[in-house]
Image: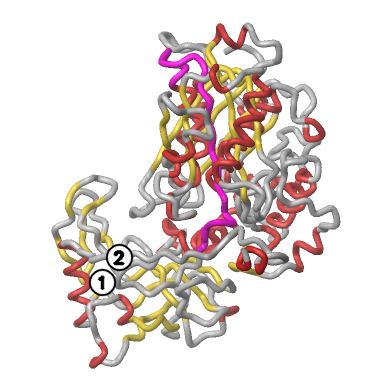
Amino acid sequence: MATKGKHRVAVVGIGQTKHDSARNDVSLAGLVREAASRALEDAGMTWSDIDAVVIGKAPDFFEGVMMPELYLAEALGATGKPMLRVHTAGSVGGSTAIVASSLVQGGIHERVLTVAFEKQSESEAMWALSLPIPFQPPLVAGAGGYFAPYIRSYMARSKAPSHIGSLVALKDRQNGLKNPYAHLHEPDITLESIQESMMLWDPIRYAETCPSSDGACAMVLVGEKTADAHSKQPAWVHGTAMRSEPGFFAGRDQVNPRGGQDCSSDVYKQAGITNPRKEIDCAEIYVPFSWFEPMWMENLHFADEGAGWKMTEEGATSMTGDLPVNCSGGVLCSNPIGASGMLRFAESAMQVRAQAGEHQVDGARLALGHAYGGASQFYSMWIVGADKP
Amino acid sequence: MAKIQALEGVEPVTMIDAPARLDYTFTAGRATSRFLKGLEKKKLLGERSAATGKVYIPPRGADPVAGVPTDEQVEVADCGTVTSFCVVNVKFYGQAMECPYVCALVLLDGADVAMFGLIQEMPYEDVHPGLRVEAVWVDDNELSTTLENIKYFRPTGQEDAPLETYKEHV
């Protein structure tokens, strides 16, 4: 249902780069232009059709280029047009798409190009995420070191068997084989090879961890009039929501954070969804470490608290399950950090547009895109559908 | 011309490492300054929120839930309970420790938020939630206004803390 006073929004163009450990063939500008050109081509548009550009990435000190949007404006055809930069840590790809959507929804612009990227080969994420805190010994080793104790808490609370994390990694890596843009293509991966891989941040194994990728993603979002005139199936935006919470406060539940619960309840309500497990056909969610799949299944109200791992174990989240999750291979196959959230949003839109190729879920009509960031404290989500809201 | 010919057959440079550094002056602020000055005397000074009754350490001067200043200083114990932990096997820039090591969330007695701390004097595979640990401080002549005054935490040998005492922290 379209909320009164809001204009309908649809995705009519989607593009992404081939993600890789090092895209030495392109600069930052070349990387974002590759994704944006493909989105325009998909939309049947040219640079001059675009009214405004919304861009997002992880914090600037990843690549060490301050305010890269200024120099990327030309590569994105944004000279003389409004350009907005979005900052919300790892959830930024999702929030960037939501800002673009809001500009159309509010009637400000009719055709908005949105882009998100990261070039991890030209940055040092481990360093960027382990900045020395004055007067404190350096102990916490990057994102994995930060999240590992909470994954351990999830395992203890839910009594999940220890192989669940490996099952998620196997599923997502096998899904990734069907996605030509995925960074990791590991045809020989097995449950055994995952379980034999090194414990990096015990209980997180190497093979249960996302790679470090170069990549970009772009979408063209338009108003109803433009979407109606479009020849291809659009993905209609049925709801968008963002929430954040402090990373540090007494009584904070970091396994099942309130921010994520509230964000998903909000986006389902906007989309008129009362039973998400039944009504949503597939989901692309942000799983940088495999154990986050069962954790987010609970946070997103697909499973009761403590039961998310059963969905993984029963195969409910596989391509043939009742709620296929991360058919693209997800963040476990490609992690260009700033783009990772937008890839989740874009892949969910690709599903309802029936353009996901080999990893298409048959008959997908309604899909969830999800991103999170920081200390599990920033959330952005959208619901897209094949039908008009 | 001679110079250009000399470059024939040389791999073109497409990428260079350019390390950047940023030096800055850090102003700790009221609450953190009191905390750091306490550390110099081997005291762990947290702050209690009048609104929620919760004790924050290290204090940031405000209660993030109620959005009010935390004015009451509270000394918390230098011993506590491991609520969860990670065995770190990854090397990173600036790392002081040999891998593997245990980075644990330690809930100090009297505090309502856990702090990250290093666990030593126990094989890493024996560390578990509920483990009672105590701070091992540097020698008195090395004390300074830094959390590095605590070299690490070690097991106290006490019985494990019951889950009820730290349940809301896991």
The image quadrant of residue B139 is bottom left
Same chain for mark 2 and mark 1? The answer is yes
**Residue A266 seen anywhere in this rendered image of the structure:** no
Secondary structure, mark 1, is strand
**For residue B76, which numbered disc appears in the image?**
1
**For residue B95, which numbered disc appears in the image?**
none
Residue under label 2, please give it: B111
Type of the residue with mark 2: Ala
Type of the residue with mark 1: Val
Measuring 21% from the left and 71% from the top, which residue is drawn there?
B75
Q: Position of residue B81 (x, y in %)?
A: 41, 72
Task: Report the chain holding disc 2.
Answer: B
- In this rendered view, identify the residue nearer to me: B13 or A249: B13
Q: How far apart in space, not on screen, are marks 2 and 1 (Cα)? A: 6 Å
Q: Quadrant of the N terminus of chain B?
A: bottom right
The range drawn in magenta is: A103-126
Q: Residue furthest right?
A: A188
